[in-house]
Image (tube, rainbow, N blue to C red):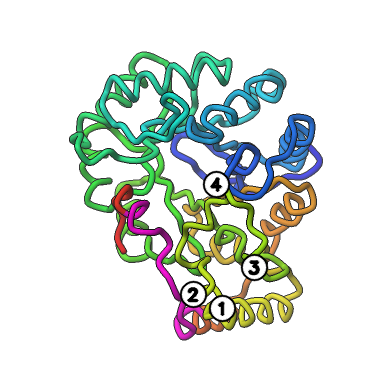
């Protein structure tokens, strides 16, 4: 590897502080790269020192795991920490949230087949189907560990109370939820609960789904299938109100000799040594820019100035619409 990222604990593993969220390689934002481009990005991430790669059965309705399993994992399986998720997955070509034990088991078996591996290092309950007791869902994930199909388990987009219930059922290695300079909900209770229980915290969407880009996102150019089209913060009336927030952070980044994406990642890494980030991208230039954020040091004074911006300039719009919000179990 040509670069050595700093390391942090992810459950039982020591991994790079910055991982790779692989969703963008299959769906969600813009046009996904072709297979050759995707593999080039995965290899570059590995060469730059990334050691944890985050996928899910949901991403591309199985495409993402298939992509990873076809070539990349065959070369590097023993050198990386492989992460995937179940409980939300492809069923007859549709996205279905289902935490029933038999459904989670079906998801896991499908993931193992697509990834072409016999064990997944960290396996999350991607979303909790609230019709199923959390103890039943987590108990099933715990069974996977006992069976040797999964080495550690995690939970995603759940509240501090649900984390406690899950952890009491079977040890939770990591919690994953959205956390960024414009989504600070985990600071209500989740971060402290993770620290109390010894659960690693993984921040997804650390770049605010592309809002923290070097150039202001052109929302009128989003593709029809781009998932941001359904998110309130990316609706015109809210987006325009959020431009002052963007401008203030962009100026702050320029004054600290870094890009806005790098500032966003560095801020998260400064929130505690137990916080890891998994930015996603389909572009090599963005990947390299993101990795460089590991080296950015923000002084106590700079962090205080930045917090003043975050605490005084409001963010308009909720992060999910009503339907999507009903699918998560987090403090709002």
Q: In front of the other: label 3 or label 1?
A: 1
Q: Give the residue drawn at x 57%, y 21%.
A: 115
Q: Residue 128, located in which quarter of the rendered image?
A: top left
Q: Which residue is the site of mark 1?
A: 240
Q: Are marks 2 and 1 in contact (CB under 8 Å)?
A: yes
Where residue 263 is drawn, which disc sits there?
3
Q: Is residue 144 above or below residue 40?
A: above
Q: Position of residue 249 (x, y in %)?
A: 62, 77
Closer to the camera in the image, 233 or 109: 233
| Of pointers 4 and 3, the one earlier in the residue sequence | 4
| Of pointers 2 and 3, the one earlier in the residue sequence | 2
Q: Give the residue drawn at x 73%, y 45%.
A: 4
| Of pointers 4 and 1, the one earlier in the residue sequence | 4
Q: Residues within 10 Å of mark 4 (few under 14, many from 20)?
A: some
| Of pointers 3 and 1, the one earlier in the residue sequence | 1
Q: In whole angstroms, how far apart are the C-alphas of marks 4 and 3? A: 19 Å
Secondary structure of the residue carrying numbered label 3: helix
Q: In front of the other: label 4 or label 1?
A: 1
Q: Give the residue drawn at x 18%, y 35%.
A: 133
In this picture, which residue range is highlighted in magenta?
A: 310-325
Q: Is residue 75 above or below residue 178?
A: above
Q: In whole angstroms, how far apart are the C-alphas of marks 3 and 1? A: 22 Å
Q: Which residue is the site of mark 4?
A: 8
Secondary structure of the residue carrying numbered label 4: strand
Closer to the camera in the image, 242 or 296: 242
Secondary structure of the residue carrying numbered label 2: helix
Q: Are marks 3 and 1 in contact (CB under 8 Å)?
A: no
Q: Residue 60, located in which quarter of the rendered image?
A: top right
Q: In whole angstroms, how far apart are the C-alphas of marks 2 and 1? A: 5 Å
């Amino acid at each position: 590897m040509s670069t050595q990222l700093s390391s942090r604990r992810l459950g039982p593993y020591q991994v790079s502080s910055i991982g790779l969220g692989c969703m963008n390689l299959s769906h969600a934002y813009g046009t996904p790269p072709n297979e050759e481009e995707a593999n080039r990005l995965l290899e570059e991430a590995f060469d730059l020192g990334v050691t944890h790669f985050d996928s899910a059965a949901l991403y591309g309705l199985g495409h993402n795991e298939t992509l990873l399993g076809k070539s990349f994992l065959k070369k590097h399986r023993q050198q990386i920490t492989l992460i995937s998720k179940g409980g939300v997955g492809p069923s007859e070509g549709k996205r279905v949230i289902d935490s029933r034990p038999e459904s989670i088991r079906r998801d896991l078996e499908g993931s193992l087949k697509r990834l072409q591996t016999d064990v997944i290092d960290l396996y999350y309950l991607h979303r909790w189907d609230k019709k199923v007791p959390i103890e039943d869902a987590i108990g099933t994930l715990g069974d996977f560990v006992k069976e040797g199909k999964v080495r550690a388990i995690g939970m995603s987009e759940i509240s501090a109370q649900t984390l406690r219930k899950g952890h009491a059922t079977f040890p939770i290695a990591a919690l994953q939820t959205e956390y960024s300079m414009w989504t600070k909900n985990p600071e209500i209770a989740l971060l402290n609960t993770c620290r109390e229980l010894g659960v690693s915290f993984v921040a997804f969407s650390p770049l605010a789904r592309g809002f923290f880009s070097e150039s202001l996102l052109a929302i009128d150019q989003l593709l029809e299938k781009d998932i941001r089209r359904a998110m309130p913060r990316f609706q015109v009336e809210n987006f325009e109100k959020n431009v002052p927030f963007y401008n203030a952070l962009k100026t702050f980044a320029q004054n600290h000799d870094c890009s806005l994406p790098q500032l966003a990642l560095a801020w998260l890494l400064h929130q505690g040594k137990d916080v890891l980030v998994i930015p996603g991208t389909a572009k090599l230039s963005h990947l390299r820019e993101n990795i460089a954020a590991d080296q950015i040091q923000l002084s106590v004074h700079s962090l205080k100035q930045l917090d003043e911006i975050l605490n005084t300039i409001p963010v308009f719009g909720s992060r999910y619409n009503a339907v999507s919000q009903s699918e998560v179990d987090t403090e709002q």
